[in-house]
Image: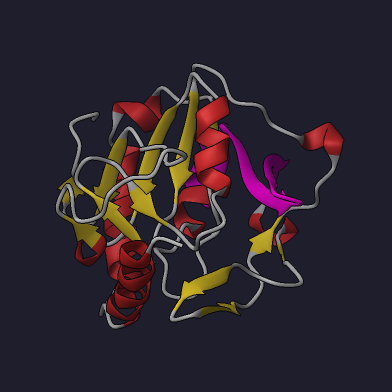
Amino acid sequence: MNDTKSALRLQYLKIRAEIPDRAARSAAIAERLFASDAYVKASEVLTFAGFGSEADTLGIIRRALADGKVVALPVARAGRMRFYRIFGPEELTPSARGPAVRGGGGRSWQPGIPEPVPDPANEVLCGPKTLLLVPGIVMDKSGYRIGYGGGYYDRYMAVNRPMVSVGLCFAAQVAEAGAFAPEAHDAPVDAVLTEEGWILPYA
C-alpha cells in the first residue's frame, strides 16, 4: 500500500465532508461541463452517481438524457467495471455494498452506490465521442487521482480508448501536481473540472 496515498485519501475525505454548499457547487460544475466542447460533442456520457459527500451528478444525468445522449453508469464486479445504459435516474438502485476506504491500517466499507441493472444488452462501450466522467477523492493538477483504492477507473481508462475523460471534484479536493507519486497502473484523466473551472486546458 502506498502510505502517502493512504494518508491523502483519509485527509481529503475529511476535507470533502466539510465542504459547504455542495449542492450549489455541484450545479456550478454541471453548468461548466454543459458549456464545454467535451460535453457538446459527446454522443455517450459515462458518468458516476455521486454519493455521500461527492459532487452530485444527478443534474448531469438528467440534462444528458434530455439532450438525447446515451447515458451509462458503472457496475463493478470481480475486479472489472462495465457501464450500462439508463433511460432515467429512477432505474438506479443502491448496490449491496459500496467501495472500501483504504487507509489507517485497514479499510472500511461505504454505503451502497446507486447503480444500473447490469443487463448485457444495455452495456455501453466507449468510442471517439464518449465522455467519461471520473470521480475521485483527490485530483492533482496533472490529472492523476486518488480514489477509494480499487483501481477500477485506472484499469478502465488504460484499455478503453479513444475517449475524453474528465475528473469531477470540488476545488478543495485539488492538489498540486506532484503531491503524490503516480504508480505504474495509475491512469490520468484528460482534464479536471471543479466549480471554479477547468484545471487542465482540455475545454
When asked about the image quadrant of residue 28, the answer is bottom left
How many labels were placed on the picture? 0
141 with respect to 152 (left or right) = left
- Color theme of the render: secondary structure
Can residue 66 be seen here?
no
Q: Position of residue 83 (x, y in %)?
A: 67, 41
81 is within the stretch colored magenta: yes
Is 21 in front, or is 150? 150
Q: Locate the C terminus and report the quarter of the image it occupies.
A: top left
Q: Position of residue 53 (x, y in %)?
A: 42, 74
| Residue at 19%, 57% in the rendered image | 175
Q: Which residues are magenta?
A: 62-87
| Residue at 18%, 31% in the rendered image | 201
| Residue at 38%, 44% in the rendered image | 183
Q: Is 124 rendered above or below residue 182?
A: above
When asked about the image quadrant of residue 5, the answer is bottom left
16 with respect to 105 (left or right) = left
Q: Position of residue 168 (x, y in %)?
A: 36, 51
Can residue 19 be seen here?
yes
| Residue at 36%, 46% in the rendered image | 167
Q: Position of residue 118 (x, y in %)?
A: 80, 47
177 is within the stretch colored magenta: no
Is 29 in front, or is 187? 187
163 with respect to 9 (left or right) = right
Q: Is 147 rendered above or below residue 73?
A: below
